[in-house]
Image (cartoon, coloured by chain):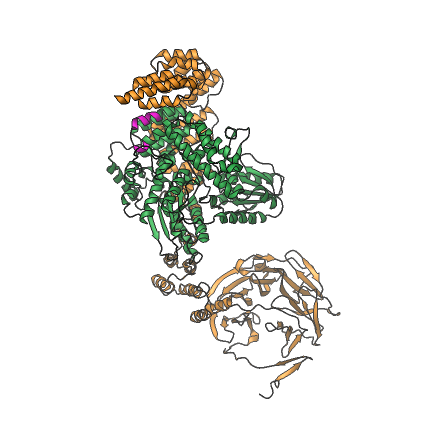
Amino acid sequence: MDCYTANWNPLGDSAFYRKYELYSMDWDLKEELRDCLVAAAPYGGPIALLRNPWRKEKAASVRPVLEIYSASGMPLASLLWKSGPVVSLGWSAEEELLCVQEDGVVLVYGLHGDFRRHFSMGNEVLQNRVLDARIFHTEFGSGVAILTGAHRFTLSANVGDLKLRRMPEVPGLQSAPSCWTTLCQDRVAHILLAVGPDLYLLDHAACSSVTPPGLAPGVSSFLQMAVSFTYRHLALFTDTGYIWMGTTSLKEKLCEFNCNIRAPPKQMVWCSRPRSKERAVVVAWERRLMVVGDAPESIQYKQLTIQVLLDRLVLRRLYPLAIQICEYLRLPEVQGVSRILAHWACYKVQQKDVSDEDVARAINQKLGDTPGVSYSDIAARAYGCGRTELAIKLLEYEPRSGEQVPLLLKMKRSKLALSKAIESGDTDLVFTVLLHLKNELNRGDFFMTLRNQPMALSLYRQFCKYQELETLKDLYNQDDNHQELGSFHIRASYAAEERIEGRVAALQTAADAFYKAKNEFAAKATEDQMRLLRLQRRLEDELGGRFLDLSLHDTVTTLILGGHNKRAEQLARDFRIPDKRLWWLKLTALADLEDWEELEKFSKSKKSPIGYLPFVEICMKQHNKYEAKKYTSRVGPEQKVKALLLVGDVAQAADVAIEHRNEAELSLVLSHCTGATDGATADKIQRARAQAQKK
Amino acid sequence: MAFPHRPDAPELPDFSMLKRLARDQLIYLLEQLPGKKDLFIEADLMSPLDRIANVSILKQHEVDKLYKVESKPAVSSSEQLCFLVRPRIKNMRYIANLVNADKLAGRTRKYKVIFSPQKFYACEMVLEEEGIYGDVSCDEWAFSLLPLDVDLLSMELPEFFRDYFLEGDQRWINTVAQALHLLSTLYGPFPNCYGIGRCAKMSYELWRKLEDEEDGETKGRRPEIGHIFLLDRDMDFVTALCSQVVYEGLVDDTFRIKCGSVDFGPEVTSSDKSLKVLLNAEDKNGRALLLCCRYTGEAGRRKLQFCVRRRGMDIKQMKNFVSQELKGLKQEHRLLSLHIGACESIMKKKTKQDFQELIKTEHALLEGFNIRESTSYIEEHIDRQVSPIESLRLMCLLSITENGLIPKDYRSLKTQYLQSYGPEHLLTFSNLRRAGLLTEQAPGDTLTAVESKVSKLVTDKAAGKITDAFSSLAKRSNFRAISKKLNLIPRVDGEYDLKVPRDMAYVFSGAYVPLSCRIIEQVLERRSWQGLDEVVRLLNCSELAFTDMTREDKASSESLRLILVVFLGGCTFSEISALRFLGREKGYRFIFLTTAVTNSARLMEAMSEVKA
């Protein structure tokens, strides 16, 4: 109490240090640490130990043991190493243990020694073996850098999304570099290596020689280098016992120090406390520890966020503790409790000794419909553990049917996926599944599946209509849908074919299909169209002019307008044009020609099936009152008033209306009595009305 | 306004926000491609785009030249090309051709495709198949609601009708659900939901799913709109097929209103050029113009209907009427004269084609008398080649009101039609049959026998023969029975005075209450489908009519009188007018959301097959 500073020792001029034990390690090590590969995860994470029998005696009869401890030495896992020789160990940011083998294969283990996956660093590495390896952390995740026996570097900046990069050759490099490290600058991973008195920086494209500013002369070799955790600072230890500290960009020197020890240090690392302004490098030899510091400058450290803390608890399967923390901190469910429950569920599905039913039920009981829990994610994990049936059971709890689809597809339950996609109402999702099915099934099965799903079928048809016409035809064929096949061929007759023979052939196919569909009307209509087409072609050849693709009505009209009355008559007979139509047609055509003489002749050829009012109307339309009047007398009684009014004979119209004693007609005539001369007529009508009322 | 709202009528929400949202998003997307660029716009998007961002706004965001996406390739020298298109495969081909041509010429440019209102996987697939997926960047312009009037929102998706009701393609349902989601995000939840029809049900369920997934956003918000009603167009084809006689409807039928504005040709402007007139006029002159338009609208409407009833169509009288009534608004004289010109032009056209006879026939069809006479009228219509679309419309109206044509007529009318208008319409008939618009009465079957057969086919899933999502068999219209049940043909004692409308039938000169509007009225009155079981059954919708009420204490009485009506497959101006009228009578306000404003001609054209 009386002397706080009693156990503090001076360090340089202005700093002091003290030594005390934070806690003692719980572990009971069988091996000496020096014989082991050791990896400690950042932020007080777990420690992995693997006795390295390959280092000393080549033929090791006993298999080594991989042990994982917590930061305080609590044993977490222990397993017999059955794979090949390991060169390096390291923890990823997600606390996965990466074990780099000599053959370039990287095995990935979980915190509890559970094997996760493996990947290879490529052929070049396999051939030349791994000489040295580093696991490093970037903002994208964790990376692996390899130095091969051929003194070449290969790296992947993110093992989660493996992209191997082979770094360029270092010119003249004959032996392994004396030391090397990975740097991360401008979001790109580089390698810095020392060969004799030279430093080289390797990036994807080039190898460039670099020189640290203010480096003391006389250096013939670099023995150690260390990069700070944030990749901002670099320390170099030379064979002259000199330490250079500066920025990784090699643009600035922070300080230098000569320790006069020329032996290569065992380890050199940057150390600083969070928020500390002091930066220091710790250098360790067999029996000596040295701290080298520099003048203060601010550094920001990112702290562990609460989310990361929770993640770490979850990784250690301390679910109840994590949940309690969430509740204590009142985290929103989605970020807190639900997420942890989801993790718990993912762990639960890995319990192979529990039956699918029990696991599914247990999970559902605990999770219910907690917001933010994705059953499809849990199911995906179950599928990852090879439990397809469990995955399907879990998917049934997923309320969003759309979410079920990707996993179902992955599990090759495509038909179920299709149903779920349809249920989701998301047509894009349905379409995605359809394309999957199309590749997965043979054509027959694919069509069969479609047939049972009208919604998907309609969607696919729409696509085919524009993009795959032949498939559309096959679809109809498969269904024996002759009606649609007929329509298909009719469309084809318009779209593809220019030549008349081709069009007729397509129409013939269509007609046959319509017969099969028992649609006689359509079949006959199509045959008529074929006849018409051929005839129009002939007319064009013989008479010139344009006939093709006119309607029957227009074809006959064109013939009349061209003065080919005989042909017109013939056509009308051949195609059995009804009398009424023919009369309307001729009437209109002759009026258009203003062939009044022919019109009159025509009107007298026999009794008009359409009456004579149309004659009056058509003449008036052509402003020929003289001709119009010729027909008024022949108009039937019920339309006579109308006809007379059309030609402007109000007086006579009044007479007829009075004769008919028809009130409606009388008012119609009256409404036309607008001219000055119509006064008498109007009076006449009024009188007639009055008379009618008297009776 | 001619018909003022009741003083207690609720205020409409401000929908101009939707425009601002769309504009901001578009600008954001344009700026994603910094620097000068040429913009290729799909023809169908031009008018809607014009309502959101005019050329000067586009220029401000470095759009250099504008091109129309059409069949012939455009020559652009810009280094950056931006395409604003609907998600259609043919557009993808257009873009692919352009990009591939550049590649052949060794030219590299930047390409950006903006899909509106959303992109479809099939489109990206095509880009990939054409080998240009990596060359273009894709984005979505989620512009799905265009306010055409203070109470009218259009999705401007006319193809919805054909895609869904003919092809059974459900792609747009998601778009509808997204649009509803946007509305509920902006204007609060809808406490009372009703709907009828398969598409209505699917859209509703999908929308609910969206709400559930993103819960919290609308929760706790005060609802501004108390009711939502979703209705499929195929619940009521009849109303859409009738000739319109309300003013906007007449203008739409005659001149085609496009995106809320209409091009008046020389015959209206009485000069040699065309003029584009905004029909609701919300932009520059604001309120005054709106009032004026409404007024002319109402005046024109009343006058026209008056004239139609009276047979004698006296233009001079009408001109006097309109100009006298509107003396006070001289500053808008230009616009007025335009509308008068429009009226005149309509009158001319309608007299020429003997509009009277046509209306008479339609009314006869609606009421179900003189069927033979109407059939002959239609036949003559076809024989005289009056108009292919009009003939088709009358045939469909006959078919639906009569539960299908008798086999003899079915064959003969079709034969006549093919002779008049060309054999390619065989495909049109096949479409109409599939959509249930033009069908044949099953010979010998009594009504009940057919129905039981149909219901068996529909429920029996093993009957794999129904490969179509929509079987025309299941679509007996039962119009006559429904009409009787819902009293759609009002009894009129004496003359129906259009100046004092009595009921919604006024939109059809007092002859017919629009079925769609009657259904909505009935359900709102009951706050459910209770007591309408028979009608629902006749509409073939026993499983497809739904009510969903959430206990919502926060809903103010004002909001409970605001009703959002969603027409899936389009609605007509007649229906809008009818419901506006109903709103005025009952103190409600209706808000219309439609996939597009439609009319009989558009419906028929959507079903027509035109030679490629």
Left or right: where A207 falls relative to B609: right
Q: Nearer the viewer, residue A11 or A301?
A: A301
Q: Nearer the viewer, residue B105 or B566?
A: B566
- Where is the N terminus of chain B found, in terms of image quarters? top left
Looking at the image, the residue that sits furthest to the right is A217
Q: Nearer the viewer, residue B476 or A248?
A: B476
Chain coloured green here: B
The location of residue B384, given as percent across then percent down, is 39, 23
The location of residue A365, given as percent across then percent down, is 35, 64
The location of residue B90, given as percent across then percent down, is 50, 38
Left or right: where A627 falls relative to A290: left
Looking at the image, the residue that sits furthest to the bottom is A2
Residue A527 appears in the figure: no
Most frequent secondary structure within the magenta stretch: helix
Residue B417 appears in the figure: yes
The location of residue A21, given as percent across then percent down, is 56, 81
Q: Nearer the viewer, residue B313 or A270?
A: B313
Instruction: Find out whether residue B372 is within the magenta segment.
Output: yes
Instruction: Find out whether residue A355 is within the magenta segment.
Output: no
Q: Say if B420 sits above or below A299 in the image.
A: above
Q: Say if A47 sits above or below A3 in the image.
A: above
- What is the number of callouts on the image? 0
Q: Quadrant of residue B454?
A: top left
Left or right: where B310 falls relative to B534: right
Q: Say if B521 sits above or below B186 in the image.
A: above
Q: Quadrant of residue A135?
A: bottom right
Shade representing chain A: orange
Residue extent of the magenta highlight: B365-377
